[in-house]
Each structure stands twice: as structure tokens, then as C-alpha cells.
Image (cartoon, rainbow, N blue to C red):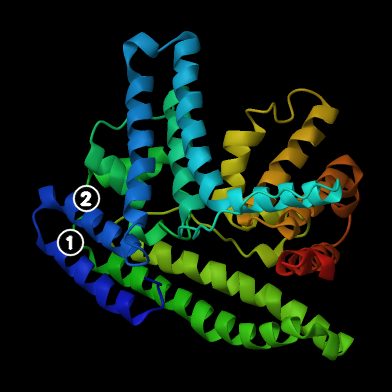
Amino acid sequence: MLFHSFSFLLFFPLVTGMYFLIPKRAKQLWLLVASYYFYMSWNVQYGCLILLVTAIGYGGGLLLAQNKVRQGKRRLAVLTGSVLLCVGILFFFKYSAFAVQNINELLRAVGSVRALRVPDLILPVGISFYTFQTIGYLIDVWKGKTEAEKSFLRFALFVAFFPQLVAGPIERSGSLLAQLREPAEFDYDRVKDGLLLMLWGYFEKMWVADRAAILVDQVYQDYRNYSSGMLVLATVLFAVQIYCDFGGYSHIAIGAAKVLGIRLMDNFRQPYFAVNCREFWRRWHISLSSWFREYVYIPLGGNRKGLVRQLFNIMVVWMLTGLWHGANWNFVLWGVYYGVLLMIEKLFLLKWLDKLPNWIGHIYSMFLVIIGWTIFAQTDIHQL
């Protein structure tokens, strides 16, 4: 069920109306049922998959909270096992076909006639979002930043909460679980603000992104027959399209949650006004970039173990960020592109940019971001 589908325009008012009418003790169950219906409207089998991820996260959290595993290697083993199970599910559904295809390419390159069968899997919608949210919860429990959730119903709702289930933001357990424990009552001003934010998201998605996509798709699908001017125009429009598409979905999600009394984190803060690439990624898909910072970059050592290690950590994070967006080499190259740019900025470029007028930084940032979107858009790596 897409946010801009007729089904959602029927689904959301019904869910919201019932949510504020039913007793407080039934609100969590109602939202959970609605969230599973929302998710399973794509494919009924998706419900089994998200339930499996939920069970891993819930069980892992409870084990981490037990006194007998509070300290030592056993506790680390519980965390490692739980995280690896979540990562394994994500890898199997999202990356196994990509991995097998590349293994087959290597086999052909060395002259082997053998080939592995490529798995024929349908990528479950939103799997990257809810697995990352579950992994973040497990790490937070392990670090003691949040308490293990004892209610399976509430934890299942944390994983499957429908406004942010398929396109984020990737919420932190300390924020979302706390809000789910105390269901909100109806508040006219809050509901009005949430609906207005949803309306703005629909405008971005349907009136800007979808219209820009018409020209972008037409040019990119037959780029050899268009002039360089049209290619530049299509590339600029793609930057507009991808922002309004993803930003629009985020605004709809945040607005829908606000109607229900749940505050989700901001995911975009005028990213195209950034004056360098580092700032751009502090404004774009904030929930993902901050997730990688908290759960990958800092645990790897961050900037605490010397410059060489810091540069290595930056590249690891950005290769993973590229892969997170899709199982294709163009996404890996896109991640490497930003990793290199951020390392260059870290080493010497930022101190020069800081001395220049902001308008020069805006031009610099937009130029490099648009080049990045060109890489991102080309699923056929040979076109680059």
C-alpha cells in the first residue's frame, strides 16, 4: 500500500478515527493490526518475515537484559548472534542474488564452465529500514542506553509502525518505544499540523517528483539521442525528483505519525542549501547517516584512533551506505565517491571552504551532489 494510493486514502482515516475512539488499552493492538495489514497488502508472506525479525530483536533484547549475561563474553555473543541473524536475513533477501551474479562473473573470468543458480527472490518492501531499526535497538540495549522491552506487542509495533515502516525515518528505540508506551489523546492543533505536513509531502511527491520523473526517465532511457543540454537538464531534474520523492515520503510519514501523537525524527533539513558535502549528509536522510555514525563509525573507532584509521572508517561507512541503497555496483561506486570526497574535505578542503563566501560553497556542494546523483541513477555500470 503506497502513501499516494487510493487504498491509503481510505486506510489512514479509518485507522486514525478508530484509534481515537477505542479505549486506551486497545490502542497499541489496533495500531499493530493496522501496521501488519498495511505491510501485508504488498505480499501476505511479508508478515512472516517482519514477525521473524521482530522475534529475533525481542528475544535478543530480553537475553541481553538477563542478569546471567549482563557481563562478559556471553553477553557479547548474544548481541553478535542476534545482529548476525538480522543481517543474514537482510543479506539473503537483498544481496544474495547480487553476490551470486558476481561469483558467476568471476568463475567465467577464470574460464570455469560452472555457474551457481541465481536466487529468484522478491525484495521485501522496507526490509532495510526495519532490520536496521531492530539492530539499533539491540545495540542500544547492549550499551544500556535503553531498557529491553518486555511487551512483545509494543516491541512488534516499534518494528512495524506503519507510517515509517517502508521508507523511514529509521527511529531510535529510546524515542519511539517511550512514545508508544503512552498513547496520545486527540489534539486538534497536533492533528491539523500533521495533516498539513502530509499535504506538503503529497505535493512534493505527486506534483513535483512524479512530473520531473517523466522527463528524467525519457531522457535517461534513451540518452544517446539527446543533446548535452537535455542531459544536463535531466540530471538537474533528477536531483529535484529524488529529493521531492524521498523527502515527500518522509514528510507524509512524519505527518501521519504526528496525527497519531507520535513524533518521528526529521529526515531532511534543506540539504541543497549545504555548503559542503559533509554538511549535505548532515541534512540528507538524517536518520540513516546518523545511524551509520552511531552504530558503525563510532564502534569502529571514529576519530579516536588516528587519522589513517579515521579515513578507513569513513570509507567503510560509505561503502556500506552505498550498498544499503541497493544491490548494484553503481551504488557501491556512489558510496566510494562520497567516501573519497569526505576524506578530501577532512584532509584539507574544509579549511579553505570555510574562508569562502557561502554562495561558493553552495555551488561547490550542488555540483558534486549532482555528479553523485548521476552515478546513483545509472544501474548499468557500463553507462558511466
Q: Residue at x 91, y 43 (%)?
A: 348
Q: Is residue 311 above or below residue 264?
A: above
Q: Residue at x 38, y 75 (%)?
A: 196
Residue labelled with disc 1: 19
Amino acid found under the numbered disc labelled 1:
Tyr
**In this rendering, would 208 be left or right of 6?**
right
Residue labelled with disc 2: 183
Dots 1 and 2: beta carbons under 8 Å?
yes
Quadrant (top left, top right, bottom left, bottom right) of the N terminus: bottom left
Dot 1, how many residues are within 10 Å of its Cα: few (below 14), some (14-19), or many (20+)? many
**In this rendering, would 6 be left or right of 80?**
left
Q: Secondary structure at mark 1?
A: helix
Q: In front: 118, or 19?
A: 118
Q: In front: 350, or 6?
A: 6
**In this rendering, would 24 be left or right of 359?**
left
**Which x, y percent locates residue 363?**
83, 68
Dot 2, how many residues are within 10 Å of its Cα: few (below 14), some (14-19), or many (20+)? some
Q: Quadrant of residue 292?
A: top right
Sequence order check: which comes first, mark 1 or mark 2? Answer: 1
